[in-house]
Amino acid sequence: MKHASTPSANEIDSLGHYFSGQLSLATTDLPHEISERLRVARLLAIGQRKPLVQVRQAQTNTVHANGTLASSGDEGLGLWGILASSLPLLALVVGLLAIQWTKDDNIAMEIAATDSALLTDELPPHAYTDAGFAQFLKLNRSTTGQHD
């Protein structure tokens, strides 16, 4: 697979001069009013271009003699960029802590309910180890909570 080579700054400048010369050839026989309007439009276009972007690209990308392309390590992340990129991680940690806290709270509530049933009921303790009886207690708790 062939890759197109990127033109250098000198090649781009020479192409710009060539196209500018071709456009200037066509303007020799235009009326004075139209040529002045074109001149003003060119000046406005040159004034509105953004040279800082071109200068920054030229500073960050350099081509070495062996043909490798190197750029500066600056990604442009400031303090706000770093803080903004750490927000999803912080939200994940807070969410996991909330889930763990809720899970621990539910387990503690189930243990407390079983302990209170053991202490207030006349059943033998081995009845609470039966899975069917534990299910009966859960159903009984939910129905008594609705009638209160």
Image: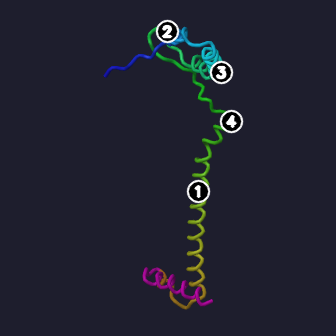
Q: Secondary structure at mark 2?
A: helix
Q: Are marks 2 and 3 in contact (CB under 8 Å)?
A: no
Which residue is found at the position 62% from the left and 46% from the top? 87
Few, some or many residues within 10 Å of mark 2 (<14, 14–19, 20+): few
Q: In the rendered image, which residue does mark 1 sit on?
A: 95
Q: Amino acid at mark 3?
A: Leu
Image position, residue 59 (x, y; %): 59, 17
Spatial separation of the CA atoms under disc 1 and disc 3 = 54 Å
Mark number, residue 21 = none
- Distance of label 2 from label 3 (alpha carbons): 21 Å
| Residues drawn in magenta | 129-148
Among numbered discs 4 and 3, the one appearing first in the sequence = 3
Pointer 4 or 1: first along the chain:
4
Cα separation between marks 4 and 1: 24 Å
Label 2 belongs to which residue?
18
Q: Nearer the viewer, mark 1 or mark 3?
A: 3
Tell me residue 88's x, y (percent): 58, 47
Magenta run includes residue 9: no
Residue drawn 59% across and 90% down?
147
Q: Nearer the viewer, residue 95 or 80?
A: 80
Most extreme residue toward the left is: 1
The three-letter code of the residue at mark 1 reads Gly
Residue under the image location 54 percent in, 20 percent down: 71
Measure how far apart labels 4 and 2 are at the Cα level.
45 Å
* Three-letter amino acid code at the position of disc 2: Tyr
User: In the picture provided, is 13 more to the left or to the right than 50?
Assistant: left
Task: Return the mark for residue 79.
Answer: 4
113 or 78: nearer the viewer: 78
Q: Quadrant of residue 43?
A: top right
Position of residue 86 measured from the top left corner of the image (x, y, whole percent): 61, 43
User: Which residue is under mark 3?
Assistant: 44
Q: Which is the main secondary structure of the residues drawn in magenta?
A: helix
